[in-house]
Image (cartoon, grey):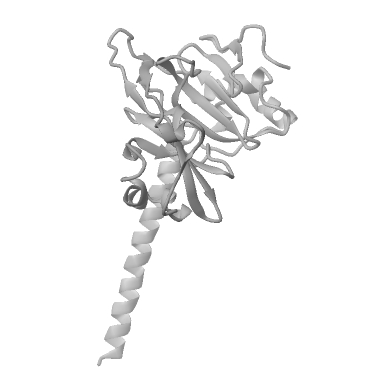
Amino acid sequence: MDWSRAKSVLIAAFLLLNIVLGYQLWLEWRERIDSAVDWTSLPADIRQSMTNKGIRVNAEIPTDTPEMRGLTFRLREPPAGMANGPLELNPQPNTRIVFSEEELQRELGGVVPEINRYRFDYPGSSEKAWVLNRIVEGWPIFDVRIELYYKDQKITSYRQDRIDIVPSEDAKPQKVLPATKVVAFLIDRNYLPNGSAIKDIQLGYHGQLYNSEMQVSAPSWRVLLEDGEVFYVDAISGEVVTDQGEAASKLNADGAGASGARS
């Protein structure tokens, strides 16, 4: 064997591999840059307020502002066995399956109805349950979900909201408010406590679930803090609602808020 020639081939192969890996890293870096917003684009007073209050943003800020309309849907009655609590699973699959859509479908697709219509919501999950949100036209409904309860690395039971979408052509799609404007408003109006950290900013649908068959959900930005507190901002009207369902002040078109924000 010509070791000199073999060595040259190996060196060339490693160089080609490095070029490929470097290109992949560049693509990932470019995707991150494209999907994040430069915080220097925020008003100087907002950036100064963040510094003074020790507020951090540990999440990418979405740049998309699609046109969306409200949703109307009908809640289905839960199965008889779920009326008093989650349904037990037997056998109990390993929790790792939630990180793989293929494994999740294979293990629970025949057990949990329509699980293929739900998407894993890692930021919205807790120490007791993995959460999957119902998806409509690519966007999550934050209030309609599957909760997979787990213990000792095993999924032990589940609870599920099931719905039927009611078609509606009356509402005209409208462009949503930019995420940067929403976050700046929350900071400016003192919704975010000093020292808080934003861990997730996501667009979807949110509405208060009433004791009624028919429900309405509006396009909303969900701003989730590291301590678990959640703020929903109507992506069309700018109304701010806490995770307790308390309506607060409203973001106007020019970014100013009405009275009523907490201090």
Q: Position of residue 3 (x, y in %)?
A: 30, 90
Residue at (51, 35) in percent of width and height: 85
- Tell me if residue 164 comes above or below residue 227 in the rendering: above
Relative to the observer, which residue lies in front, 94 or 218?
94
Relative to the observer, which residue lies in front, 174 or 33?
174
Q: How many marks?
A: 0
Q: Position of residue 25 (x, y in %)?
A: 41, 54
Residue at (38, 60) in percent of width and height: 21
Q: Position of residue 63 (x, y in %)?
A: 44, 29
Q: Residue furthest left?
A: 1
Residue 151 left/right relative to 88: right
Residue 75 left/right relative to 250: left
Q: Splitting the image into 4 quarters, where does residue 56 fall?
A: top right
Q: Splitting the image into 4 quarters, where does residue 190 fall?
A: top right
Relative to the observer, which residue lies in front, 114 or 187?
114
Residue 251 left/right relative to 46: left
